[in-house]
Amino acid sequence: MSRRFLLVGLTGGLATGKSTVSDMLRARGCVVLDADVLAREVVEPGQPALATIAREFGADVLRPDGTLDRKRLGAIVFADTERRRRLEAITHPAIRDRYLARLAELQAQGFDGVVVWDAPVMIESGGYKHVDRLVVVVTDDATQRERALARDGDRADVERKIASQMPLADKAALADYVIDNSGDRVATQAQVEKIHGVLVREAEISRRLLGRAMPLSALFPIGMGIYGRNRVDVRDAFARLKAASPRFCVVAHHWRPSGNFVFADPGSDGMSHAIEAAEAVLALKAVGRRFSQLRQLVWQWPTQWQTRLAPLPGRDVRVAVMLSGGVPPEGRVAGVIRDRIEIVRWVTDADVLCLYRRPEKNGSLGHVSAAILRAVLPATPLR
C-alpha cells in the first residue's frame, strides 16, 4: 500500500522549544509521534527494556514502586557518553518498533496529511535519513541557557547537558527547514505556519504525480533550448530520463524548451547520482535542487530592498541563479554588476538572488546567469 502522508522529522536541542513547535504542528492537523512519549512507554513496569536498564545501571535507578527514576538515570548518562550510548542501545530498538507500528496503522487508515516524528536525537542516531523532510528548532545560545535554567534550576547540570549534545549549528546544517525560536510565540507561529503550508503542498503535488506522498526535487539542464542552442525535444527527454536509471525517478516536466524536470528526491547522498544520470541522457550539464531548497530561495528575498540600479526603463524581475558548484567567500560579489543587474543576496555558496531590470525588447533571464558567471569565474572554476 502506498504511503499517502509526508513523514517529517522534528528535532532541536535542550530548551530550544521543540515541544512548542510540535504542539503548533499538531494544532494544524499534523499527527505527531513523540519519541519521548514512546520512550516512557517502553520503560514502564513490566516492559523488557526496564529490566535491562536495571541490570545495566543498577537497582538504584528504580523507585520503590518499581518505576524508573529518570532524574537519577539522567545524571548517570549525561555525565558519561559511553553509558548514554548503552542506554540508547537498550531503548532505541523498542522505541523504533512502536514508531513503525504506528506508521503502519496510519498507512492502513489512509491518512494523507503530515506525520511529524518528534525525536531529540534523530540526527545523532541517523534516523533523520529515513524521513522525507527534516525540521530543526534552534535558539541563540543565551536564550537556550536562560530557558533551560528557568526549567531545571541547576546551571552546572544545564551546561553538562548542552555540552553532551550535538551543536545546534551542526543540526541546522542538515535541516530542510530551520525554525528560530529565539523570539516570541507569535514569531515562531508565523514560521510554523509557513513551513506547514509548504509541507502540505509538497505532499499534495507528489500524490498527484506519483500516487503517494514523498519529497520532490527539480532538475535544471544548463543551457537547454536557450537562444535556440542545445535543442532537445522535452517530451522525448522526459521519456528517456524515465527509462534511464532507478536512481533518477523523473515524474514531470515543464513544457518550455529549457526543459525543467521534477523527480523524486533521492536525498542528499543520492542527488549527485541523479544529476549524473540525467546529464548522461541529456548530454548537458545540470543543476539539481530539492523543493525545500527552492522554497528557501523564495523566502530569502529581503522584505525591504532599496535597489541601486540606475533608473533605466524596464520591468524589475526577481531572479534566482543556481550554480553547479560553490563559490568561496572572496568570489561572492555583491551589488550592481551590470547596468540592469544587481546581486541582492547570496543564499548559499551556490544560490544567489538578483534583481534584473528587464527591458521591453531583447531582454532575457539568461543575461542574468551569464553576468553572474562572468563575475564569479575569476574566483571559481564553475562548469
Image (cartoon, rainbow, N blue to C red):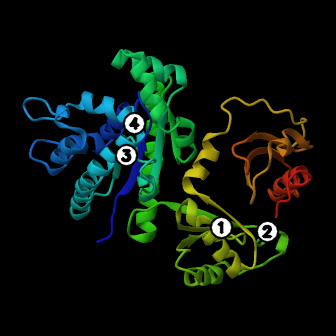
User: Which label number is shown at residue 312?
Assistant: none
Residue at the image position 42 percent from the left and 16 percent from the top: 155
Q: Are marks 2 and 4 in contact (CB under 8 Å)?
A: no
Label 4: state its secondary structure.
Answer: loop
From the viewer's perspective, is the residue at label 4 or at label 1 nearer?
Answer: 4
From the viewer's perspective, is the residue at label 3 or at label 1 nearer?
Answer: 3
- Sequence-earlier tag: 2 or 1: 2
| Quarter in which the C terminus is drawn | bottom right
- Sequence-earlier tag: 4 or 1: 4
Label 1: state its secondary structure.
Answer: loop
Residue at the image position 89 percent from the left and 49 percent from the top: 375
* Residue kind at label 4, given as amino acid type: Asp
Which residue position holds label 2?
Answer: 223
* Position of residue 163 in the picture relative to residue 315 (left or right): left
Calculate the distance from the C-alpha at mark 4 to the C-alpha at mark 1: 51 Å
From the viewer's perspective, is the residue at label 3 or at label 2 nearer?
Answer: 3
* Residue kind at label 1, given as amino acid type: Asn
* Residue kind at label 3, given as amino acid type: Arg
Q: Are marks 3 and 1 in contact (CB under 8 Å)?
A: no
Q: Nearer the viewer, residue 70 or 205?
A: 70
Calculate the distance from the C-alpha at mark 2 to the C-alpha at mark 4: 55 Å
Which residue position holds label 4?
Answer: 80
* Position of residue 55 in the picture relative to residue 254 (left or right): left
User: Which label number is shown at residue 260?
Assistant: 1
Mark 2 is surrounded, within 10 Å at the Cα level, by few (under 14), some (14 to 19) or many (20 or more) other residues, namely some
Calculate the distance from the C-alpha at mark 3 to the C-alpha at mark 1: 45 Å
Which residue position holds label 3?
Answer: 85
Residue 58 x/y as whole percent: 20, 38
* Residue kind at label 2, given as amino acid type: Gly
| Quarter in which the N terminus is drawn | bottom left
Calculate the distance from the C-alpha at mark 2 to the C-alpha at mark 1: 11 Å
